[in-house]
Amino acid sequence: MKLRSTTIFLLMPLLFFTFNSASSQESNISFGPKIGANFSKLDYDDPEPSEESITGLTAGLFLEFGSKSAFSFQVELLYSEQGADLDTDLQALSQEVELNYLQAPLLGKYRFLRIFNVHAGPQFGFLTSDIDSEDLAIENDDLDVSVVAGVGAEIGKLRVDLRYHFGFTESVQIDNSEATNLYYSVTLGYNLF
């Protein structure tokens, strides 16, 4: 119930802005699907286990307001697979931790040289499921707050984004060590309109 209330509270300003912008005659709107890959790991407090990044799917929808001007605002709703492949000294074994999120990035975007852009903003991730291969005790927070920064290119109806995601909340705890999500993502999108 608490997660539902938090979700509604966080998405209310987004919905207000969406309906407000959509009703404006001057706003240019772009909408479409996007799909790509995440290359993620977990950033731990001490002691830090050795780890390798894992590759996961990211897919969802984007909605951009002011898409024909130099400055625009873009919201997305994405499914994202994240985590890490850990080698913990305490357990003397290797385990893969997979965290699946429903994410809502809120991005400011600046276009330059007609096809390129830089974008940044906060992202709110809501944990949908977690899996660890060895069934060790892993505690996860339901909300992951991060900042997103990236570059992109738009050629015709296609768009490509390269982003870095840096987690602010310590959303994972394994072996009494807390961690934040860190990952790169590469996505390909298509403007339906």
Image (cartoon, rainbow, N blue to C red):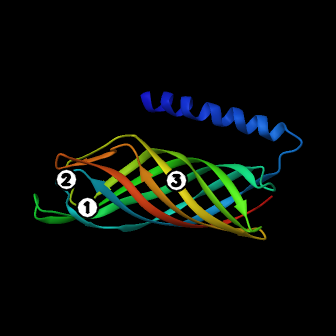
Relative height, residue 132 to residue 104 (above, below): below
Q: CA distance from mark 1 to mark 3?
A: 28 Å
Q: Nearer the viewer, mark 2 or mark 3?
A: 3
Relative height, residue 40 to residue 123 (above, below): below
The disc label shown at residue 133, or none: 1
In the picture of the structure, the residue carrying the numbered disc 3 is 148
Please state the horizontal and vertical placement of residue 49, each as a whole percent of the image: 19, 60
> In this orientation, which residue lies closer to the viewer: 35 or 44?
44
Q: Residue at point 62% right, 31% down? A: 12
Amino acid bearing label 2: Leu
Relative height, residue 3 to residue 174 (above, below): above
Amino acid bearing label 3: Val
Name the side, left or right, on which 155 lies relative to 186.
right
In the picture of the structure, the residue carrying the numbered disc 2 is 136
Please state the horizontal and vertical placement of residue 56, each as a whole percent of the image: 44, 65
Check the picture and name the quadrant holding the C terminus. bottom right
Q: Residue at point 63% right, 62% down? A: 34
> In this orientation, which residue lies closer to the viewer: 110 or 5?
110
Please state the horizontal and vertical placement of residue 178, each as a whole percent of the image: 25, 47
Helix, strand or loop status at disc 2:
loop
Amino acid bearing label 1: Ser
